[in-house]
Image: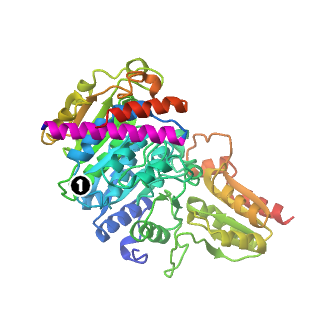
Amino acid sequence: MDKISENKMVNLANKARLLTAKMFGESGQGGHIGGSFSAAEILTVLYNGILKIDSKNPEWELRDHFVLSKGHISAMLSSVLQLRGFFGEKLLKTYDELESSFGGHTTTYIPGCEFAAGSLGHGLGFAVGLALGKKIDQLDSRVFTLMGDGELDEGSVWEAAMSANKFKLDNLIAITDRNGCNMEGFTEQSMPLESLEDKWKSFGWAVKTIDGHSVSSLVNTLKSVPFEPGKPSFIIAKTIKGKGLPRFEGDYRCHNVKQDEQKWEEDYKKLSKACN
Amino acid sequence: MLDINSDKFKNLSARNLYSRIFGEIGDQNKDVVMLGPDAIKSNGGGEFMEKFPERTFDFGIAEPNMVTAGAGLAKLNKIPLVGMYGFLVLRTAEQIRDDVCYQDLNIKLFGSHSGISMAALGVTHHGVHDISILRSFPNMTIIQPASPKEAVAAISTAVLDYVGPVYLRIPDSLYEGLYDDTYHFEIGKAYTLQDGEDVTIIASGATISIAKDAANQLTSEGISVRLINTPTIKPMDEDAIIKAAKETKGIITIEDNDLAGGLGAEICQIVCENYPTKVKMFGLPKDRFTVIAPSTKALFDYFGIHVEGIKKAAKEILS
C-alpha cells in the first residue's frame, strides 16, 4: 500500500470518528464511543478498500456482504457508510430522533446496512447463513463480519463457529475488535478469552492476529483471504478502546459516554485536527 | 398450493404426511432449503432430505444458530424450512424476534411434536409456551393444521404462496374427515365446521378432536353448538370471533398451550374489546407446570381438558 493511499485511509477513519462524536454530542444522547473508535480503521478499510459494493445500488446481487455484529457501534458504521457515499450527511443529523433509522443500534433502514444487530452474538450466525447461501448459488462474493471481543462470550458465537467449519465456508471472514474491554471491566476479568487464537484454530478456522489500527496491515490481511482454502478466516484485530481521544484510550468506562457540551466541543477540535 | 386431494397425501401418519408435504414443496421451488438441529427426520424433514440432500443442512444441536443462519439464507432469497421440537421456541425466541421477525425475512419455522404430544417425556419436552411467546412478535404468522387436508393446504400455502415469517405448529395427531375435497385454506380465516346459536366452541390443531366430540354430544342432547376451527392463530379471524360472540350465548376455547397468552387469551382480548360475553377457557393451567403422563390424552384428562368438562362448561354458559 502506498503512502498516499494509506494517508487517505487514515484520514477517512478520523473523519468517521469526528462524524460519530458529533452524532453523540449533537443528539444530546452520548453514545458508544469506546467500541466505535476502536473499530474506525477496520470499518474504513473494509468499505474503502476491500468490499465489492456499489453505494448507488446497495442491493446489488453480486456484492460482498458485511454484517456488523457489535450493533452498538451503529453510529460509526453509519459514519463510514455516509463517507462512502451511501447517503447524504444530513441523514446523520436524525440520530436518535423519533422513528429515525439511526440510533443506538443498527437497523436495516440505514442505507447499506445489511443487518439489524443489538443483542450480541447474532452476527456470525447470520453471516454463516449468507455465506452458505452464496455457496449454494455458486457466487464468488464474500461475507465479512465484525464482532466485539466481549461478544465472544456468547454461546451462539461458538455454535456459528462450528457450523462455518462444518460447511467449509472459506468465503466467510470474521474479525474481532480485540480492544480488551467490556462495559464494566476488562474482558480477561469478566470472562477470560485467551488463548483466542488457539480457540478459533481448534474450531477449524484459519487465524491471523494483526494491529487493528494499522490500515496497511488491515488492507494486506483482508486482501489475503481466505487464509487457507476450505477454511473460514478469523482475524484478531488488536485495538484500543476509545482510540483517537487520549483521555478515553484503553479505559473500559468509555463504553457508553455521556458528557457535557463543553467537553464535546473539545473533542470535536481534537478530532478535527486529526483530519487533514 | 399443493393439491389437497392428491393420492400422495392419503393414508399416511401425521409425521409421514408432513415429510411428504415438505418433500413435495421441495419439488415446487428450488429455493426451498431444509435446516434441522440433528432431528431432521424426527421433525418431518425425512423425504425432503432424501430427495434434496444438497439443500438440506444439519446444524447440530444448536438451534439458536440454526435460526439465525436461516435468516441469513432468507436474506439471499432462499426459503428456509427451519424445524425444531416445539418447546425449542423458548431457546430461540430472541433469534426469532431479532433475526427473523424484526428483519421481516421469509422463513418458515416449524415446531414438531407440538403442545403435549410428548407427554411421557416430561415437562421440558412439552411445548406449551410457543404460542404465548410468538403471538407477541410483530410480523409473525402462526398456523396450526387440524386435519390432513388442512396440513397439506396450510403448510404449502405458507411456504410457496406467502412471503414473510411463519411458525407452523404441527401436531402429532390430525383429525381425518374434517373437511371434504372442496376445502380451501386462507391465512387468517377461521372455519365454521358446524353452525349453531346456543354456544360456540373454538379449537385448533390437536384439540379439534375433543371439540368435535363435545359438539356432537351436546348436539345430540339438544344444544345448538357452533364449532369453529381456527388454523391461523395469528392473525386471528376477528370477524368470526365477534360474530360468534354476538350470535351465541358464550364461547368455549380449547387449546394445548398455556392459558397465559395462548389461543383463549387472544379470543378473550378480541371479545372484551368488541363484544363482551361469557368465555370458558380450556388449556394448560396458568402458573402451573405440566406433569409427566403416559399419553397426551392422560394429560388432557389430568387438566380437565375433556368432553365432559366442555359439556359442563357449555351448560353453565346456558344456565
Specify whether residue A154 is in view. no
State whether the magenta stretch is mostly helix, strand or loop. helix
Nearest the camera: A66 or B170? Answer: A66
Left or right of A89, for residue A25:
right
Residue indicated by mark 1: A134
Q: Amino acid at mark 1?
A: Lys
Q: Position of residue B33 (x, y in %)?
A: 31, 58
Left or right of A69, for residue A5:
left
Nearest the camera: A165 or A80? Answer: A80
Q: Position of residue A164 (x, y in %)?
A: 26, 42
Left or right of A149, for residue B201:
right
Quadrant housing the N terminus of chain A: top left
Q: Is residue B120 above or below residue B272?
A: above
Give the chain letter at badge 1: A
Residue at 40% across, 64% down: B17
Nearest the camera: B146 or A2? Answer: A2
**Judging from the image, what secondary structure is the residue with disc 1 in?**
helix
Q: Is residue B133 above or below residue B159?
A: above
Left or right of B115, for residue B29:
left
Q: Quadrant of residue A239?
A: top left
Residue at 31% across, 71% down: B28
Magenta region, residue range? A3-27
- Colour mode? rainbow
Residue at 19% across, 57% down: A139
Q: Is residue A20 magenta?
A: yes
**Residue sitting farthest toward the right:** B319
